Image (cartoon, helix red, strand yellow):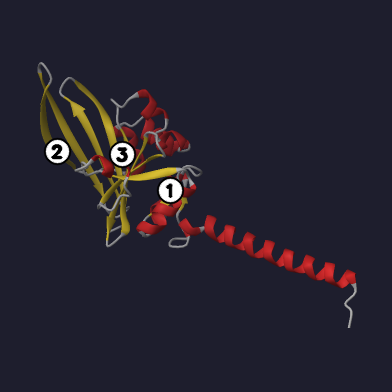
Amino acid sequence: MRVPLRLILVGKHAVASMLVGICAFLVSANSKRAYKNNQDAVELTRVDIFSLPDWKSKSVDIDGFTLGITRKEAFEIANERHLSLTSNVPPKAVGELKAPCTQASCAVGQTDGNWIGVNLFFEMDRITKIKVSVPADADPDVKKVNIAREFKGLTRQFFNRYSDGLRNRILGPAQAKETQDTLSTGHNSSYTHIEYDYLQSGIIVHVTVSKNSPEPFDLEVDFQNRQ
């Protein structure tokens, strides 16, 4: 029996539509991969988390990376966003400089570019801590791509104009844990590293102050599972 040409064309069109639909579904699923482990995560590059009344009950998502995702998922997210994960452990050979990070701590940077101020920490190949750093003495090109510049509202202010008063207002008071450090650069410079723990909120704040200035610098904030 001869099949009318019109039915053949309609059949081809239906198959093509089905394939397009499948592709669209896969792309959609792929773009949401980072959120499948925690539907409640708040992306800091899009939402001012500290302005949310219930922010302490939220998990953070930083440029697609969130607590609990696997190393494999982290690599996939990095690839989608044109980022790279490199080891924070000094390489033993030149070839290790561009090798995939298999260490417990990985720095997130632009592909063939600068570090964006994010470090991922893994246990059992899952992210258990995300550190965001805003170093005061970084190169201007590094500062330009620091992820904290993409944060919004009060969250952006906290990272880019940090003060103890702002920390107390947002996170509440916490006991300071201090350690001393002395660097020799022609003359001795004494630095104090201060840590504030907000473990119930899953946040640890690290700041450094110099004996020559009371203003904090080199802010680091750890996001981890709540205790």
Is residue 2 left or right of 26 when viewed as pictured?
right
Q: Compare residues 12 and 49 and report the one nearer the observer.
A: 12
The mark closer to the camera, 3 or 1, is 1
Mark 3 crowdedness (10 Å alpha carbons): few <14, some 14-19, many ≥20: few
Q: CA distance from mark 3 to mark 1?
A: 34 Å
Residue at left offset 9%, top offset 17%:
187
Q: Which residue is mark 1?
A: 78
Q: Earlier in the sequence, mark 2 or mark 3?
A: 3
Q: Amino acid at mark 1?
A: Ala
> Residue 92: percent from the left, percent from the top?
19, 43
The amino acid on which the numbered mark 2 sits, given as a three-letter code, is: Glu
Q: Say which mark, if any, is on residue 95.
A: none
- The answer to which of marks 3 and 1 sits earlier in the sequence is 1
The answer to the question of whether label 3 and label 1 lie on touching residues, with beta carbons closer than 8 A, is: no
Q: Are marks 2 and 3 in contact (CB under 8 Å)?
A: no
Disc 3, SS: helix
**The C terminus sits in image quarter:** bottom left
Residue 147 seen from this side:
yes
* Mark 2 → mark 3, Cα distance in angstroms: 17 Å
In the picture, residue 194 is in which quadrant? top left
Name the amino acid type tagged 3.
Asn
Please rate how many residues cluster around mark 2, counting C-alpha atoms within 10 Å: few if below 14, some from 14 to 19, many from 20.
Answer: few
Q: Residue at x 42, y 32 (%)?
A: 145
Task: Give the numbered dot on residue 168.
Answer: 3
From the viewer's perspective, is residue 178 above or below residue 52? above
Residue 27: x and y, percent?
58, 57
| Residue 188 image offset from top left, x and y in percent | 9, 20
Of marks 2 and 1, which one's residue comes earlier in the chain?
1
In the image, 103 versus 38, the foreground residue is: 103
Q: In the picture provided, is 84 more to the left or to the right than 211? A: right
- Marks 2 and 1, Cα distance to the nearest angstrom? 35 Å
Q: Which residue is mark 2?
A: 178
